[in-house]
Amino acid sequence: MKVKYLLLSLMGAMALSASAQTTAPEDQNQLPARKTAFDRSAGHWFITLQGGVSAQFLEGNQAQDFVKRLHVMPTLSIGKWHNPYFATRLQLMAGPTPTYYKTAANDVVTLNTAMAGAHFDFMFDVVNYYSKYNAKRVFHLIPFAGVGYNFKYYNDFKDFGSYFSTSQPYRHSLAANIGAQMSFRLGKRVDFVLEAQAVYNNLNIVKKDFDYKDASAAYMPKGANPDGYPYNGLLGVVTAGLNFNLGKVEWEVITPMDMDLINDLNGQINSLRAENAELAKRPVSCPECPEVVAPETKVVAGLSEKALTFKFDSDKLTPNQEIVLYEIAKFVKDNNQAISVIGYADVTGNADYNLALSERRAKAVAEILMSEYGVPSDKINVEWQGETEQFDTRAWNRVVIVRSK
């Protein structure tokens, strides 16, 4: 009977462990990023500061030389990578956006408009999507598309406003944009970015709000079919600047447990439960059976090695390890025996840093046993071994081992 219950308990513990995600062994991280699972619990935020030029690209603007149509356009972007190849951001931009046309006398007239806008972009890292994830990759190609809002203002409305049917010098405009960014890694937290995009405004215009009252006026262009003067719609923007990565930068690869394995374990548990139900129907005692006296044995209590795991470069325990801590505390209290708490780290990084990290991990476990589980401090011996390798898989060495002293 005891053997059956023991097997049932072991199967249940294995099924519970299989339901969680575990850090993937590094030799399994050979697939493209699109086929790899990543830990999304930490934020991968970024902020981008850029400066560049913009120009309007609609009929009538060719009246002015192209170089003279270029004007300063700064941008500020705040966003987040949701995985190594997909991000969203909010980009702000503002600057002068003049339009031009020729009068009947072939004079070039400038309509001094300006705009301020914000748009929400969806970004796609082509390199990370098709290649194996590499945190130190230098070059990234990131196309993007988005929607947003622009506020346009006509600075010379007081002089030319009488020529238009509207009485307002400003315009609220819905916009759509598309573009591409090239990113070059300068360091762990800084990238140089070069970006080009096209922004189309006036999506919410149903009729021309700026029809001319008098198309024959001296300052009006030839023809009676104006294209939304003084606010035309297509804006080209080219910028360059720096991108700053905030919070956690590198992505940690994880692998979900095999659901077939979990289902198989659940089936074995159900089978053992059925057998236990049958055994429970048998009589507790058998009068016809001779009494068997078990030989006296002296049992020396001992704690088998328990492993408590940590994430990369962290002294915080990974979730769902309370049952291990409970078993350790129960052993100490029931048997009044001391234990050794030994911290380890993997070989990534500096040896002195890893030694200090293993010390923090060991002391963190000891503190939890004392403060949350009531283990006496004189029953805990704390040690740390730094980057001493215990297992072939690097990630498995981010542990604290607890054993009988």
Image (cartoon, grey):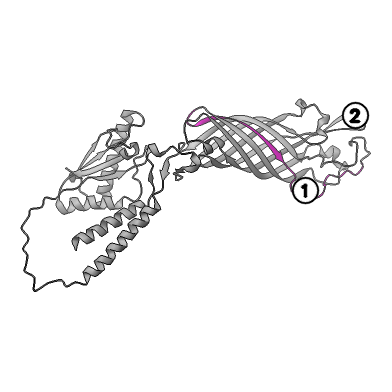
Residue 374 in view here: no
Q: Does label 1 or label 2 sit earlier along the sequence?
A: 2
For label 1, the crowd category at 10 Å Cα-Cα, with few meaning under 14, some 14 to 19 and many 20 or more, is few
Mark 1: amino acid: Ile
- In the rendered image, which quarter is residue 402 located in? top left
Which quadrant of the figure has residue 104? Answer: top right
Q: Is residue 64 left or right of residue 131?
A: right
Q: Is residue 317 left or right of residue 57?
A: left
The picture places residue 318, in percent across and down from the top left corner, at 35, 46
Chain part drawn in magenta: 187-214
| Residue 341 among magenta residues | no
Q: What secondary structure is marked by label 1?
A: loop
Q: Is residue 231 above or below residue 321?
A: above
Q: CA distance from mark 1 to mark 2?
A: 30 Å
Residue 404: where, in percent of width, then height? 17, 45
Residue at the image point whose x is 27% and y is 33% from the top:
388
**Residue type, mark 2 in image:** Asn
Please identify the dominant SS of the magenta region: loop
* Residue 310 marker: none
Q: Does residue 367 sit above or below 182 in this rendering? A: below
Q: Nearer the viewer, residue 353 or 27?
A: 27
The local secondary structure at tag 2 comes to: loop
Q: Are marks 1 and 2 in contact (CB under 8 Å)?
A: no
Question: What's the residue at 22%, 72% (across, down)?
Answer: 281
What quarter of the picture does the N terminus occupy? bottom left
Q: Which residue is mark 1?
A: 205
Is 370 situated left or right of 24 in this image?
left
Q: Which residue is mark 2?
A: 106
Q: Position of residue 399 (x, y in %)?
A: 30, 41
